[in-house]
Amino acid sequence: MTFLAPAAAALALTLPVIVALYFLRIRRPTRIVPALHLWPDQIRDRQANVPWQRLRFSWLLLLQLLVAAVLVGAAVQPVLPAGAGLAPHSIVLLDASASMQAKDVQPSRLEEAKREIGAMIDQLGPQDRMTLIAMQSKPRIVASASGDHDAMRRALDDVTASNGPADMTAALSLAAGIARAGEQSRAYLYSDGIIEPLRTAFANGLPFPIEYHRIGVSGENVGLTSLVVRTGAQTRAAYLRVHNFGQQSRTFTVEWRSDAGLIDVRPLSLTGGQAQDLVLPVPDSASTVTARIDARDNFSLDDAVTAIARTPSAFRVLLVTPGNVFLEQALRLRTDFQVDVVTPAAYRGAAAYAMTVFDRFSPATLPNAPFVLVDPPAGSQLAGAAAVGIGRVRASDAGDPLLTNVSLQDVHVARSQDLNTSRFGRALITSVQTPLVLVRDQPFRQVLVGFDIHDSDFPLRIGFPILIQNLSEWMLPPSVPSRSFHPDESVTVVPETGATVVSVVRPDGSRRELTAGSIATFADTDLVGIYTVEQTVAGKVDRAWFAVNLFSEAASQLAPVDRLTLPPARAFPASQSAHRGFLQVWPWIALVALLLVVAEWLAFHRGL
Amino acid sequence: MAAPLLEPQLLRRLEALALMVRRAVKGQTGGERRSVSRGRSPEFADFRNYTPGDDYRLIDWNAYARLDRYMLRLFVAEEELPLSLFVDLSGSMDWGRPNKAETARRLAGAIAYVALASLDRLRLTVFAEGPTSGGAPYRGRHSAPQLFQRIQSFPAGGTTDYSRLVSPIARQRPGMTVLITDGLGESPVEPAITSLRLARQEGAVLQLLAPQEIAPDWTGDARLKDAETGAEREFTATPATQASYRTALARRTGEIERAARRRGLRFVRLSSDQPVEGMVERTLRKVGLLG
């Protein structure tokens, strides 16, 4: 047994003081009574009438000495060695992601993890420190290198499960930054193992070993993993994917609702591991569609999903070309584009269009708006130097989001204007000889292509329409994207021209104001449901919606992971061994003291 | 000027009351009570033969017509009731809130006034270590102020010795005696109560206690001092000792009550926080002492 506060043993001096009180004569107030002989003969002079008289036995004295002794025993805080090994600095990574809301252990996986961590806090010794990191999409330090048990418990109680994923990579980086050099640290991961894959290998190892404590027992769950509304030529339909991630067959009902009311209810049976796609026509009047199942499983976050059914507004796009079927077809692939094609001779300006594509033509005055300028004629504004022979092309930056899904592997260009001296913007696609495609953000998002499309095999590749799609989305982003986002995913809101007030109403009714004059990034998407973007333009409120759904098969696949592949720890000297935790027993001793006080009270009232 | 012992309003209400005796008593002068002697009153008692010297106005001529003998009608004589008041003014009575001695003075004054208003003869005796006469017998409403003044003039103090009451009680003529005491002296009350019976006294024992001694309201350490003897004892009061005290008090009260009832006396336990009006108009009427 170890004592955490041995100095408190000095309180044992109260014991002789109590005994001395029984020796000492006490000052008693005089009370006149009409008949002293009626008062009991067995008057107990527990305190002697003269100082230092022989001490008489008294149950009260005995009990009071016992109470004092037991309280002194509690004050010195005796502890027993118990529990798992603890390092002087324990770094606890608590998974607070969406899957930790599962109730396969009661009351939930998160609460179970918090209970285990609470027991670990109780075992901390007086010199031990603990750091608590809540592992969410953005990990945060809840308590930093603290030895205060109460503060740690309060911090632990404040942790709630988010609806987003757990970023293990960021959490480990955070923990590695906290662990001081030379300090004996050990990390404890309390998780169900449903975490995002590590983005880095931590090749140099972590400055601490990690223990994985699995939370959760069952993967039985039925979830909705996808819901989209597609608008065809004649009809609109909602496509829903239902997946039974468990091993047992389940029968439940699927309920469809729109903002106009109930659409459909139908039963559905899925065997273990089975997934099924459901299609349902959506009324034209519906702005949103919600699907819900009553699977009564361990995880409710994926039991209801919502999709926006409203068709985004169309953009007018002008293609000025002597004739370019590749460009025209690529532009027409976008259903929200209304494409007008004119010849250069017929061009009268682009004021009415959101975007203009100039093919082998450059007007005297380029529009002050988004445009794509392809192979401008020599001598025109933005035209490059004399053409040079090219050959293979490559991406200037392979990770550029504008080149997402665009393969340039088999793309060749015969010749192109020399844009080496162009100050148009940064290169997107380049070659050994010269940059080929330049993009810029200011004053508007604009693109300069140095070669004639027909001098390349690029239009014959699948990457071409994808590039046009990426560029047009980049140049004309929707004011509010109507697709579904994941929890904690950022949403870009482009205020309408002339919007004075822009705000977002979250599913719980709370409102967030955005800056009206510029493109805003809205990141408070931790709740699932429908978010309403309200923009006030010329005194009129314009509303748009986007949805946030879990839509994560990784999270819905609730089965806890038995073994996690965790980054290795660096080599530690043998002295960095963990010690065992402590089991504090003073609360029990204090309870005994309380019982003794009750006994003393009873003894006093019984006149012992 | 000291406050009057009893308020005028109370005195008026007391005039409507009278002492109730269970049997007729023989007094010395005419009063408002039946006497064992035959006398003049509206109430018929008996017949007897006429003898020379009798008042011929009392001859029942109707009886003479029927029996041809002279018969005299006898009537109940109405005489005074001899009432003796023994009031305990020992040290133990000078205690409590309200003070027991003060309450005893007012109670004795009220009972005395009821007697005086009925033309009964009243003798007052206060006692502590020994009896002290309250002066010549009082009779009539006009003597009430003098009696009240006398009652108030006696200070409270000293020890209680009930055995010293035996002699003055034995000297009483048959009548009514009311003993007002707390019964808490160390000497036993039984000799005094027994002497009441021997002296053919009809009466009552009124035990007057303070609420603080009926239910002590304190605990903790104290030095107890006897109000009569001055004896002291260190003491620590606990709920257990308080319960023991209440048991001893109840035992003492029970002994006095049993002794009184065994000798045909009424017994009433009174608390000094009761108003005197309530004591005489309700409690004493209820036990039949007043009516």
Image (cartoon, coloured by chain):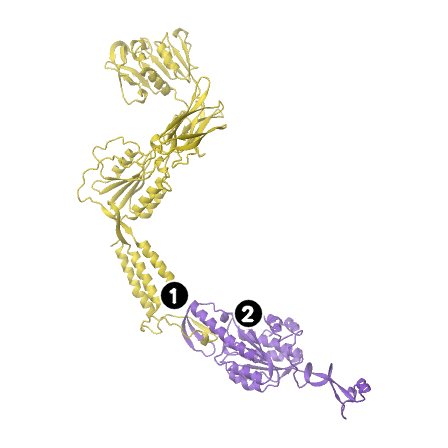
Task: Kindly report the distance in space between the C-alpha atoms of the residues bearing marks 2 and 1.
Answer: 35 Å
Q: Most extreme residue toward the left, as rendered?
A: A574
- Residue for badge 1: A603
Q: A520 above or below A113?
A: above
Position of B213 with respect to B42 (left or right) is: left
Q: B177 above or below A351?
A: below
Number of marks present in the image shown: 2
Q: Most extreme residue toward the bottom, as rendered?
A: B52
Q: Position of residue A228 (x, y in %)?
A: 41, 25
Q: Secondary structure at mark 1?
A: helix
What colour has chain A? Answer: yellow
Position of B215 with respect to A447 (left or right) is: right
Q: Secondary structure at mark 2?
A: loop
Q: Most extreme residue toward the right, as rendered?
A: B65
- Check if mark 2's residue and mark 1's residue have beta carbons within 8 Å: no
Residue found at x 28% / y 37%: A562
Q: B133 above or below A131?
A: below
- Residue for badge 2: B273
Q: Position of residue A122 (x, y in %)?
A: 30, 48
Mark 2 crowdedness (10 Å alpha carbons): few <14, some 14-19, many ≥20: some
What colour has chain B? Answer: purple
Residue found at x 25% / y 10%: A388
Mark 1 crowdedness (10 Å alpha carbons): few <14, some 14-19, many ≥20: some
Q: Position of residue A354 (x, y in %)?
A: 41, 17
Note whether residue A11 is visible.
Answer: yes
Q: Position of residue B48 (x, y in %)?
A: 74, 88
Chain of the residue under the numbered disc 1 shown in the image: A
Residue found at x 28% / y 48%: A123
Quadrant of the rendered image containing residue A456:
top left
Give the quarter of the figure containing the C terminus of chain A: bottom left
Chain of the residue under the numbered disc 2 shown in the image: B
Q: Nearer the viewer, mark 2 or mark 1?
A: 1
